[in-house]
Image (tube, rainbow, N blue to C red):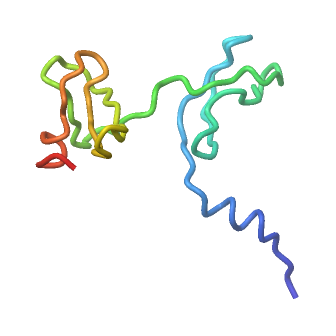
Amino acid sequence: MTVISLAAARAEREPHWQGACVCLGCRHEWQGVGPMGVHTGLQCPECNLPKGTVKWPFGPQVGDAEFRCLCGCEAMSVYKRAVDGRFITRCMACGTDQTAAIYGEAL
């Protein structure tokens, strides 16, 4: 009979990221893997301090379609307005409402 850890099995099914990491202390670079939402405080394999972080911001992979505002910004902020409960998507650089451009109509 084989005994498996249910916590370990669950962790394997959770979404993870993979990519370049860098230590803010000793500047060592390595390839890392971590659960989504944990991207700082990584233990550096060189100096063993929790000063590691992902090297590059998360974004599309090579070949993926990408949405950018006409101003060139790719960072959007999505929020639900308190006034009417509508979801709005705005460009974080220029403030242009991009809701219709992304979803086809206002939500």
Q: Position of residue 71 (x, y in %)?
A: 16, 17
Name the residue nearer the viewer: 73 or 46. Answer: 73
Name the residue nearer the viewer: 1 or 66. Answer: 66
Q: Position of residue 31 (x, y in %)?
A: 60, 34
What residue do we see at 13% from left, 42% from top?
100
What residue do we see at 13% from left, 39% from top?
101
**Count of picture labels:** 0
Q: Position of residue 24 (x, y in %)?
A: 68, 13
Q: Quadrant of residue 25?
A: top right
Q: In this view, does 45 lie to the left or right of 37?
A: right
Q: In this view, does 64 lie to the left or right of 3?
A: left
> Quarter of the image containing the N terminus?
bottom right
Does residue 93 lie above or below 82 as drawn? above
Does residue 8 lie above or below 54 as drawn? below
What residue do we see at 24% from left, 20% from top?
95
Q: Where is residue 7 in the image (x, y as percent from the top left)?
A: 77, 64
Name the residue nearer the viewer: 24 or 103. Answer: 103
Q: In which quarter of the image is residue 40?
A: top right
Does residue 77 lie above or below 6 as drawn? above
Kindly give the residue lying farthest to the bottom in the view shown.
1
Q: In this view, does 13 lie to the left or right of 7?
A: left
Does residue 7 lie above or below 64 as drawn? below
